[in-house]
Image (spheres, rainbow, N blue to C red):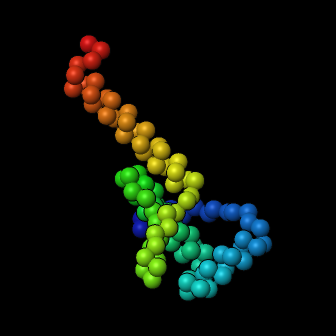
């Protein structure tokens, strides 16, 4: 069928307290659906991963105190480490090719 989205259902098991946290966030942020909450969270997470892949850090800035707090999130550390290792591998491949090493 043309024009229809190929939607998939995803189910999560959450503790009641965690579900209550989600519902409170939805109310606070005036979201209507959990899908909207998930999409917003994914947008922020994708942006954060993209930033650390570029070599940047993700942080919050308190203008009143002129204080920067770097976000400490293990999965972002993983993404940064992986991006760095891929860059290093790319640099090595380029150097090998450029210098005819191994030929």
Q: Is residue 31 left or right of residue 55?
A: right
Residue at 46%, 56% (x, y): give it: 49
103 over 83 or under it: above or below: above
Residue at screen point 22% across, 22% down? 99
Residue 56 higher or lower than 17, as above or below = above
Return the residue nearer the eye: 11 or 8.
11
**How far across and down, in percent of the image, does residue 102 sit?**
30, 15
Q: Is residue 86 above or below residue 19?
A: above
Q: Which image quarter holds the C terminus?
A: top left
Coordinates of residue 15 in the picture (x, y in percent): 77, 67
From where the camera sits, is residue 79 visible?
Answer: yes
What residue sits 56% from the left and 58% below the top?
73
Given the current orientation, which residue lies at the most extreme right position? 16
Report the number of discs: 0
Q: Report the side of 27 relative to 91 (left or right).
A: right
Q: Nearer the viewer, residue 81 or 5?
A: 81
Is residue 87 depicted above or below 12 in this figure? Answer: above
Which quadrant of the structure image shows residue 91? top left
Q: Outermost residue toward the top? A: 103
Q: Is residue 50 visible?
A: no
Q: Is residue 68 left or right of residue 10?
A: left
List x then y, in percent, for residue 44.
48, 67
Give residue 26's position: percent from left, percent from top: 60, 81
- Judge by depth and name the residue closer to the eye, 70 or 78: 70
Q: Residue at x 43, y 76 (%)?
A: 66
């Amino acid at each position: 069928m043309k024009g229809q989205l190929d939607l998939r259902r995803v189910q999560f098991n959450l503790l009641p307290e965690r579900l209550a946290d989600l519902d409170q966030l939805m109310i606070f942020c005036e979201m209507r659906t959990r899908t909207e909450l998930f999409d917003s969270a994914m947008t922020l997470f994708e942006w954060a991963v993209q930033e650390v892949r570029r070599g940047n850090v993700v942080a919050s800035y308190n203008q009143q105190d002129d204080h920067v707090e770097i976000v400490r999130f293990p999965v972002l550390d993983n993404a940064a480490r992986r991006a760095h290792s891929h860059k290093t591998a790319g640099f090595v491949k380029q150097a090998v090719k450029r210098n005819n090493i191994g030929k």
